[in-house]
Amino acid sequence: MLKYIVGRVFAMLITLFIIVTLSFFVIRLMPQNIFDNPDLPPYVVEILEKKMHLDKPMYVQYYYFLRGIFLEGDFGTSVKIRPSLPVFQVLKSRLPISMLINVLSLFISIPIGITAGTIAALRKNKLPDHAVSLLVVLFISVPSFVFASLMQYGLTFLYPIFPTLYNPSATTLRQLAMSITLPVVALALNPIATVARYLRGELIETMSSEFLLLARTKGLTRAQAVMRHAFRNSCVPLVNIVIPMFTGIMGGSLVIESIFSIPGMGGMMISSINAGDHPLTIAILIFYSIISLVTMLIMDISYGLLDPRIRMGGRR
Amino acid sequence: MPSSEYLLEVQGLRQYFASGRGKNRLVVKAVDDISFGVKPAETFGLVGESGCGKTTTGRTIIRLCDPTAGRVFFDGREVSGRMTNDLRKYLTDNIAMIFQDPIESLNPRMTIEEIVGEGLKVRGLKDKAEIRRRVVEMLVKVGLNEEHATRYPHEFSGGQRQRIGIARAVIVKPKMIIADEPVSALDVSIQAQVINLLNDLKEELGLTILFIAHDLSVVKYFSNRIGVMYYGRLVEVAKGDDLYKNPLHPYTRALLSAIPQPNPLTERTRQRVDYVPDRDHDYSTEQPTMVEVEPEHFVLCSPSELLEYRRRIAQNV
Amino acid sequence: MFGRYDMDEQIRNLPDSYFELVDQDQLADGALPTTPIGFFKDAFLRFKKNKVSMFSFWMIVFIIILSVIAPFFNRYSYVQQHTQLRDMPPRIPVLEKLGIADGTRVLTNRRKANIENPDLFPPASVLEVFNHRVVNGVEVVDAVIDMYSYRNAKDVYFWFGSDYLGRDLFTRLFWGTRMSLLIAFFAVITNIIIGTVYGAISGYYGGTTDMLMMRITEILAGIPYLVVVMLFILLFGTGMFSIIFALTVTGWIGTARLVRAQFYRFKGREYVLAARTLGVPDRTLIFRHILPNSVGPIITRAMIAIPGAIFSESFLAFIGLGLQAPRPSIGILLSDGQKVLLQYPYQTLFPAVLISVLMISFNLFANGLRDSLDPTKRGEE
Amino acid sequence: MQDRRHVHETRQDDTILRVRDLKVSFRSYGGLVQAVRGISFDLKRGETVAVVGESGSGKSVSIKTIMGILPSNAIIESGEIMYDGKDLTKVSEDDFHEIRGKRIGLIFQDPLSALNPIMKIGKQITEALVLAQKMNPKEARGQALELMNAVGISDAERRFDQYPFQFSGGMRQRIVIAIALAGDPEILICDEPTTALDVTVQARILELINSIKKSRNLSVIFITHDLGVVANMADRVNVMYAGKIVETGTSEEIFFDPAHPYTWALLSSMPDLETKERLLAIPGTPPNMIFPPKGDAFAPRNKNALKIDLEMEPPFFKLSETHYAATWLLHPKAPKVELPEVLKARIARMKGGGELHA
């Protein structure tokens, strides 16, 4: 098991390294100089360039870039959005609300999806199954930002139940909850459908397995057999889809945050892209990569923990 | 040294499969130093339990996998060396194979005519009418008819599919056929159809057959000589009757004793013999080699075991 | 206990002629009762029976046709601006008589004096005034205004309304659909081609080649999709081809894995081995024996990838990395519409409905395709 | 030899399970598959009844019906399965788990897929004890270890906490047997328990089943297609073809005095270690059970078919108190048909006793 984890961590570091390298070259290959502001006197640019090692050859810059990130946690300095503020600082102020929304979406979608998928599988080809299937197609097909717009118009304008935009000065829990409900729901619909569809398929397959038959011939009731054997076994491969789901949520969050004016990473990223603040953009991208790589790692490890065949060094 | 006595001769064949790298490296000795020969127009049966390497042996001979070591000769020519187009042609022209699974072994997207005719096509036959004629001729020979040529495999039953597989192998007029468990996936009532068909074809075409199976009864019925495999090694080779009357290697004895016979009288009194390699052999000082104990009866044994086996034969005869 | 018949009278007295041996010496295999059907024909027949998927299929065809011909339905082009006619509500001939899409708009909280001032609102444009009330001593009303009379454009019809530059949204929507579909199709085709070739090589040759190739995809797949796409677009700009390639950069990996798995599975199948022992060359093995058997999942995957690509494109447009103005795409329309959602909801409504219908149709179509191409369900009705 | 037979209701005290006229069909896309077309048999206390037939003959479906684990597209069209005063075809799903495991145990064909891959085998053995019989876990563990020893799993303490993938095929089958025995059933149903195993392993598993049967006084229904296994295990044999029992009798009667042409064919179609003559192949293929043939289902493949075979289903003809066969060849008016030569030779050889391993 330890070997398995070490292997995974190693693979993750390689991937991270590649992302950082790609990012570095993308910044450097950007057509315009990041200090193309005509208001800056040339000597200031020179000082800045010296400070950021831009006068040195490419590979030296690359060295400093890597050293900055891996040894000092220094992702560079924002140039346009929050000039000369370390990118890390900028991110730190924006991160909590984004993570809150993303993690919340993930956490509500898994149990709801599991419930829906289980109901559909147990009532296969009956009304509940058809209902779930219909919702699944709807939620998987329609993009989250369409849902967001729909809800924003319907539930904040026609029937003003929720605030239209995020309330940054929310003081009570209730206010906060009200102002993040719609974004969280918009983000969770697709994952709910994904989980439900996947679990339904897995469960139906497991329920026709021989070991479920054996469980029933042991004298377990149908409910016991399904819960203890089919359900648990079907949930293990769910881990596989949670990773892309979480990255999907984080991606969707970019747009949803901008729709609801949430001062999170998403909004920051869009404005930094549009403003051409490349160091900031790239730092955000690296940051996103780290988060999703860590998610992946956690999922890989939990997969190993859940499935004894991997844990014991067998094969997948 | 290839001798003229054998059509197919296998010398010290090894097939190792490695997985993993570094510390995890795991080498499976699927076939571990086996030697035997198949005479022209005879049927040589290779028998053993799952995972004993019998299938791998067949596949290595026909070069579905490249051997790790050892040499294979066919009709005096080595067929185990580096693969060239010429060698491939020589191999595929002379040896054909019949597979186990009647469902898996026919391409579901091709018609029977395409499946059976493919070998002819590969050999450069372009005339469609001629291919058709020969396919139909072959189908009739295996008990099917012309109408079946345009069908797809899924429309046939297991026995029919297996006969189609035989037609595919025989149509290219090979000298030798490797039959890998051709009946074990079939229903009892169908197995006899296929066995009889193989027997008829063998007589009619003078085929040499390497017959691979796990069912010793079928192997014994069908083969002139039998090789018994255990965990990648050939432990005993003998004529069918000799093997049955005088099983020498303890594994052969265990195998024979385990086969259930459709006879309630003998079954009720049957004594099963276990084979426990560590208990049955003492190879701490002597290494076993393949020795001809009596004419055409080879056993893998150590010198002291050899003495014991000779004594046993003397008593039995 | 055993028979329903016993040796009763009736049975004992059966006529002698019944007990003659039937001459059955020739017991050959009979002809088959079924007619031969090729795999794809069979799949097609089964697909046709799936009503939902058939409907989705025709829906997709309908939208594609619209995206080609709809821009010619009226005299506007997707760039033509009407600065006097910005943000006009939808107005469609015939339907307007029924009160739907009649080019009206409800203005709320207006000074009554203004509404009644013919210089500001030509009398013909004010259709209804209601909700009279006094706020802060000012008389305030709500009014239904015919925007087309109001802007003095009585014979103008913007079927889906116009946007903030007075561009016809109907034309832009279907132009946008065309762009979105083109981008999606090209991205998916490139994905499938690269993925199939890569996966086929990796799966067919196996061994070290396979291991190396799979390590590469593993690392590439570790990089979040979004990150790659964005880096790519930052680097190469936001042209159509740049977007297509951005969607391809890591999109092919899934296909490659799928194809590899298929090849890996099929190359060990006994029929492939059988063909090899007959001397069938690699090329034929790949194209005749392996590919036709794995084409079902590949097609299904392509069909599922199309809505994915449409989504990605609109997503990029939403965050400002889509096509550049004035070219429309569904995503750009949505993004523009979103900015004025609460004032002019129809600007979001039409593209939202279209993208939803399109994605639902593609998904349902792909589901049906998957079921009918599933070889295990072959021959079922 | 063809006397009228009456059902002896009085002698049923030693009959533990009675199947009468059971008919089971499956809804399929092609139509209704008539898997079991009216079978009847008894299982007596302490005996082993074998059901022999090839795939599709309905043997697995009949035992699935007894266990109440038919898939949802199955329909029990008629018949009854009397066990302990109850008709099992009428027991609801809610009550059936009281019978499964505790009264009737089942051993599967493929031990690999029958075990939950991610659950420790100890837990798989004990879970029914703990959940269904409310035994406390510690006690259950003790009993499981005992069972594991009984089925020949050595080092049970350590292996209790292992997973199925860590066991060989034969060991897995032993675990499945232990699971089946955990509820201490009185009937054990074995569905081709050794088909997936090697011969030497098969021999050991058969020995195990036989010894367990004796020590626990179990009644066993043994499903197989292998006549060798039948000879080894069975007291009585039912031969099934196309959803019906075509011949029933004691082991000796079936092997030494077979009466149905299908039984003949089965016995002579497979070589034994001494066969030299040409095998008697059964031509054609088993019938499509969506459209089972009229009359005797075996007639189209039978060289000795009578005209009536194609018209009318044969009733059971009595050969002895225990031996019945459903073939018109036993009708007094039927021509005398000799046993095939191959079979004659083989029976003579068998009766001579095997000189094998003297």
Image (cartoon, rainbow, N blue to C red):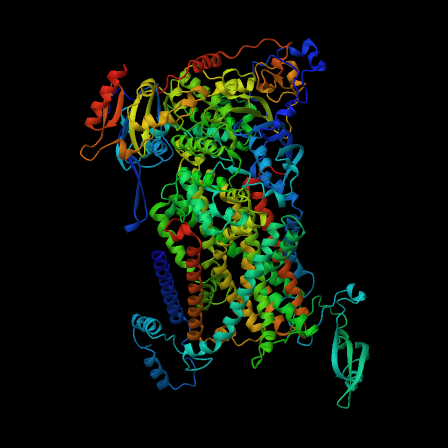
- Residue at x 58%, y 60% (from the top left corner): A112
Indicate the position of residue C369 as horizontal and vertical percent values: 58, 47
How many numbered marks, from 0 up?
0
Q: Is residue B314 left or right of residue B50?
A: left
User: Foreground: A240 or C60?
Assistant: A240
Q: Nearer the viewer, residue D167 or B168?
A: D167
Q: Nearer the viewer, residue D198 or B13?
A: D198
Q: Is residue C44 above or below residue D42?
A: below
Picture quadrant of residue B244: top left
Instruction: Tell me where residue C367 appears, x and y as whole percent.
Output: 59, 49
Where is residue A252? Give x, y as percent. Answer: 54, 66
Instruction: Using the rendered view, name the quadrant where residue D261 is placed.
Output: top right
Q: Residue furthest left?
A: B285
Q: Position of residue D166 (x, y in %)?
A: 39, 45
Query: Residue visible at 57% across and 25% down?
Result: D240
Q: Is residue B190 above or below residue A173?
A: above
Residue A64 seen anywhere in this rendered image of the structure: yes
| Residue C64 seen | no
Front residue of A65 and C160 = A65
Q: Quadrant of the C terminus of chain B?
A: top left
**Image side of residue A125 versus residue B55, left or right:** right
Q: Quadrant of the N terminus of chain B?
A: top left
